[in-house]
Amino acid sequence: MINLSYDIDKLEYLIAQVMPEEEVRPWIRANRKAFTDMLAYYQCAMNEVETRFRILSTTLSLEFDHNPIESIQTRIKTTESMIEKMQRRGFPFSIEGIENNIYDVAGVRVVCSFPSDIYMLADAFLQQDDIHLIARKDYLEAPKRNGYRSLHLIVELPIYLHDRKKYVKVEVQLRTISQDWWASLEHKIKYKKSIPADVSAELGEKLLHCAEIAARLDHEMELISIKAALYTEEPPL
Ligand code: 0O2
């Protein structure tokens, strides 16, 4: 849950890094409410997407005799990270600028049992007629050079406010348990500044090797599950 009574001193400190000093206070006065409203809208859209995946998990498990989702995590991007991304991409900081240019302010990570569950869930989710697909990046089909694998969907969906409907963007990442385990360790190592360059390169190679082992393991586990499913017991009458 995000803190909607956002620490205004912290926001002021962050904004001061991207605006001339004399503009900071007027910006905060003019935009404080709009900024917390924006975070609340992202939170609502993120909750909505999470609920839709939970419903899909229940209905698909009735159909296919296994629950395709192991876990779901959600997060709202920190303001630091939004500002850093806007700067890196050369956009001036504004609420409209964030809404139009940063697609992963609201993030939902769906951790699946098997690779085929990822596509089954993504297809079922994208079939919902109020979900607009903005972008799809398939890092399962084409893994990143470091071995990263996941399916990323940027979608836009409506949230219903008391007086209007608003479309909000959410990034959905779908991956298997082993891909999630790998990504979590790789993420920690990537941001460890104390690792010397040669050790970092060596760890990168080892991580790439582990990503390939994990992909083979996912494939083998899926074959086992398909075979086991042939012997599903009928429920007693
Ligand atoms: P966090 O903390 O998860 O928010 P960008 O790289 O963000 O400038 P883009 O196009 O948004 O550009 O990137 P992409 O490829 O869609 O990836 C966005 C998110 O995917 C990242 O968010 C990570 O969560 C995840 N991701 C992508 N590549 C990797 C990777 O090589 N390793 C790991 N561990 N995660 C990856 P953030 O903002 O980096 O981090």
Image: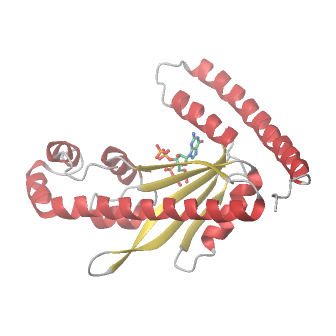
Is residue 42 among the parts visible in the rendering? yes
Q: Residue furthest front?
A: 237
Taking the image as shown, residue 142 lies to the left or right of residue 157, namely: right
x, y (%) of residue 106? Answer: 43, 57
25 vs 109, nearest the viewer? 109
Q: Across the whole image, how many numbered discs are drawn on residues? A: 0
Is residue 141 among the parts visible in the rendering? no
Position of residue 207 relative to residue 108, above or below, is above
Position of residue 123 relative to residue 225, above or below, is below
Q: Quarter of the image holding residue 199? A: top right
x, y (%) of residue 82? Answer: 36, 51
- Which residue is painted at 69% across and 54% down in the image? 68
Q: Quarter of the image holding residue 200? A: top right
Position of residue 157 relative to residue 196, above or below, is below
Taking the image as shown, residue 10 lies to the left or right of residue 151, namely: left
What's the coloring here?
secondary structure
Position of residue 213 relative to residue 1, above or below, is above
Taking the image as shown, residue 19 lies to the left or right of residue 202, namely: left
x, y (%) of residue 52? Answer: 53, 65
Q: Quarter of the image holding residue 218? A: top right
136 vs 220, nearest the viewer? 220
Taking the image as shown, residue 121 lies to the left or right of residue 42, namely: right
- Which residue is painted at 29% across and 63% down in the image? 38
- Which residue is painted at 8% across and 52% down in the image? 22
> Which quarter of the image is occupied by the C terminus?
bottom right
